[in-house]
Amino acid sequence: MRTIEDCKLYVITGEQYHPGRPLAEVMEAAIAGGADIVQLRDKNGTPAERFAKAKFLRALTRRHGALFIVNDDTELALAADADGVHLGQDDLPLEEARRRVGRGMLIGISTHEIAQALEAERAGADYVGVGPVYPTATKPGRKAVTTSYVSEAAAMLRIPFFAIGGIAPETAGDVLAAGARRLCAVSAVVGHPDPAAVCVSLKRSIEKWEALDAGRMNGWTTAESMETEETKKSEKIKETEETKVTEETKVTEETKVTEETEESEVTKVTEESLVTEECMKTAAVVSPVAATADGMRIPLLLNGKRAWSEASTLGALATALGLAERRVMAELNGEAVPREDWNTVQIRADDRVEFVQFVGGG
Ligand SMILES: Cc1ncc(COP(=O)(O)OP(=O)(O)O)c(N)n1
Ligand SMILES: Cc1ncsc1CCOP(=O)(O)O
Ligand SMILES: [Mg+2]
């Protein structure tokens, strides 16, 4: 059976999005496409209808090895032998829900800001929802939290989080670039004529970023295992980029995945003044700014990864990274910045900076 850590794609029912199409057909397609978790979210059915759907989804998910979560209702979760229950900020408090469902059941909590997520983590939530990232008709009136909350969650949470709200193949790239590695969707999947295809696409996007992360992890190596630029080029990972680190500088080599190109890209980022996400996680309980020793460093999302820099301009950052003389492109918050402007473009806290070097193909 899958654990919550294994689960990357979470699909929630939304029968209003597939009128005339049976729930069974749509959710079976979602699972066939790679949904790891299915949640029953039914605000309108009678208790008997909700119970029947829960029993059906329990059997379906069990058959396919997926997890089954019930929204809002601990009693229904218990009655249907679900794997867990999902609760919002205005639902039953986590402590009371835990008393009712016991240790063996997963509890997920919706969060809309980092303080709520840290509190849920502290109180024993198994995962949190982070959203709505974008405004969504599925949760009307709920303010979008934007990808900046996704970045905070990525930097500060230890438990798994699922980005939710407006998640679709078109938005997944930005949400993953902000640091999410788990996605949750309703309308984009269940409202699509081909739910399986949407799930396949979302799952592929997640896996691309995981492959990129694996490259970054490989980068946390010692000088002995450092490779030459040429070696690295020949070992490009399909559809991903790699990360390398030198022992002395504890430098990250960050990369970027673009949806537009199938070519791998390798960006070498070498600098002394960056502290990576690892340091950030150690200081997770304090604010990002307080986490810096000297208070001078700016928190950034550098090639999708949380980092810190003393550089105040894009040019200074490129210099610090050893990229000033390299044939690289820079993007600041999704906008390409011409090289002639690098020294005048200021970097601010939580800016998203991407340095990309194309190495082959094109
Ligand atoms: C995975 C996941 N995340 C968030 C929610 C929303 O829960 P809540 O805020 O309680 O809103 P409702 O879904 O009950 O309207 C969720 N259901 N699942
Ligand atoms: C239930 C919920 N909670 C936060 S956003 C959301 C709905 C997400 O739906 P969609 O994927 O259709 O935007
Ligand atoms: Mg709820």
Image: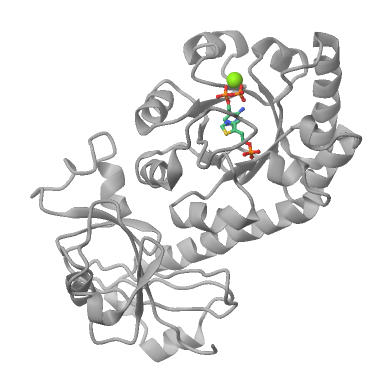
| Relative depth, front residue between 344 and 182 | 344
Quadrant location of ligand 3? top right
At 37% from the left and 87% from the top, the residue drawn is 229
Residue 276 position, x and y percent, is: 28, 57
Residue 240 position, x and y percent, is: 53, 72
* Residue at the left extreme of this rendering: 294
Q: Quadrant of the N terminus?
A: top right
Q: Quadrant of the C terminus?
A: bottom right
Residue 186 position, x and y percent, is: 68, 38
At 81% from the left and 29% from the top, the residue drawn is 57
**Circle count:** 0
* Relative height, residue 222 to residue 235 (above, below): above
- Report the coloring of the rendering: one colour
Going by the image, does 152 lie left or right of 56? left
Residue 215 position, x and y percent, is: 46, 68
> Image quadrant of residue 149?
top left
Going by the image, does 326 lie left or right of 310? right
Can you see residue 250?
yes
